[in-house]
């Protein structure tokens, strides 16, 4: 499946565009990271790509078909959406929350059946949170809830996962668990992902491609290794940075260190 934004522009009401001529794509077994500073429009971009907000001009396409022309059930069978995790005030159990991911496969009045419950249960186990079965979502940690939301998206059996800052507000361990999960879904099951993130190091570690959004509405898109460079990060975040590779136990890692606020910012 090819998921593509073609010359997408967006602005609210009569205001100026906050997203200008966005062009990017993600194909089978690829991870695309979207980087940019707070308020630059990363979440807005995701909503536009999913048709939750309407592009002012341009479009989102799946295999050449405009998302706006697709039935909701068709769209959500192909795509699993993982919003920013917020502790739930609703009395859903983890099992019930993940089962909601099967809705795109059900008719309007159809109830989940045995097969749907089995798929949901397998997704919980696949994500490694079987110990949470039966627990209320309002009684688990933020990191655990994030994994539950990923399992819910996975229950739709999507070809593409779209995740909005999935590692934000998590400790180091839970950040790594989320990143490793996204990579393993790509490598082992062929599920592509689009990931909003504030962390250039995370984007470098998991991504095949990157889209960097700038305050002036412009953007940079390309292979992760050629797009996530010091010059582009300085423009996007308004800071001087140093990108440095190093090796630990014969494995390569990349460190992105913010040095100072860039002049004029």
Image: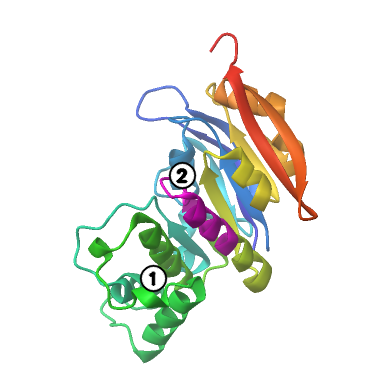
- Which residue is label 1 attached to? 101
Please tell me which of labels 1 and 2 falls first in the chain.
2
Residue occupying image coordinates x 66% and y 72% = 188
**Where are the magenta residues, as a range?**
163-182
* Spatial CA span between label 1 and label 2: 21 Å
Task: Please identify the quadrant where the N terminus is shown.
Answer: bottom right
**Protein image colouring:** rainbow
- Which residue is label 2 attached to? 48
168 in the magenta segment = yes
- Give the vertical position of 252 relative to 62 (above or below): above
Using the rendered view, name the quadrant where residue 24 is placed: top right
Q: Nearer the viewer, residue 261 or 116?
A: 261
Q: Residue furthest bottom?
A: 114
Residue occupying image coordinates x 41% and y 79% = 120
- Give the vertical position of 2 relative to 5 (above or below): below
Q: Residue furthest right?
A: 250
Q: Position of residue 108 (x, y in %)?
A: 29, 75
The answer to whether any part of residue 153 appears in the image is: yes
- Relative to 229, 169 lies left or right: left
- Give the vertical position of 102 relative to 24 (above or below): below
Using the rendered view, name the quadrant where residue 159 is placed: bottom right
| Mark 1 or 2, closer to the camera | 1
The answer to whether any part of residue 5 appears in the image is: no
Residue occupying image coordinates x 62% and y 61% = 183
Mark 1 crowd level (few <14, some 14–19, many ≥20, 10 Å Cα): many
Q: Nearer the viewer, residue 217 or 224?
A: 224
Q: Position of residue 179 (x, y in %)?
A: 57, 56
Q: Position of residue 176 (x, y in %)?
A: 55, 55
Question: What kind of element bears circle 1?
Answer: helix
Q: Residue furthest top?
A: 264
């Amino acid at each position: 499946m090819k998921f593509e934004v073609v010359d997408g522009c967006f602005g609210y009401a009569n205001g100026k565009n906050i997203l200008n001529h966005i062009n990017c794509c993600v194909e089978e077994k690829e991870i695309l990271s979207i980087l940019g500073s707070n308020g630059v429009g990363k979440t807005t971009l995701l909503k536009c790509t999913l048709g939750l907000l309407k592009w002012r001009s341009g479009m989102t396409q799946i295999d050449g078909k405009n998302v706006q022309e697709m039935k909701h059930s068709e769209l959500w069978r192909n795509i699993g959406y993982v919003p920013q995790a917020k502790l739930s005030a609703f009395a859903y159990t983890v099992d019930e929350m993940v089962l909601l991911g099967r809705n795109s496969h059900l008719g309007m009045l159809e109830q989940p059946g045995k097969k749907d419950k089995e798929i949901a249960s397998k997704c919980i186990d696949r994500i490694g949170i079987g110990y949470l079965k039966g627990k209320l979502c309002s009684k688990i940690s933020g990191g655990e809830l994030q994994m539950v939301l990923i399992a819910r998206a996975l229950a739709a059996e999507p070809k593409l996962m779209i995740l909005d800052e999935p590692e934000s507000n998590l400790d180091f361990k839970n950040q790594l668990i989320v990143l490793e999960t996204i990579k393993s879904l790509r490598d082992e099951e062929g599920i592509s992902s689009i990931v909003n993130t504030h962390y250039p190091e995370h984007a470098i570690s998991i991504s095949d491609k990157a889209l960097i959004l700038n305050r002036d509405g412009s953007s940079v898109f390309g292979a992760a290794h050629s797009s996530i460079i010091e010059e582009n990060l300085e423009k996007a975040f308004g800071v001087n940075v140093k990108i440095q590779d190093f090796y630990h136990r014969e494995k390569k890692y990349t460190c992105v260190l913010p040095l100072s606020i860039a002049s004029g910012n």
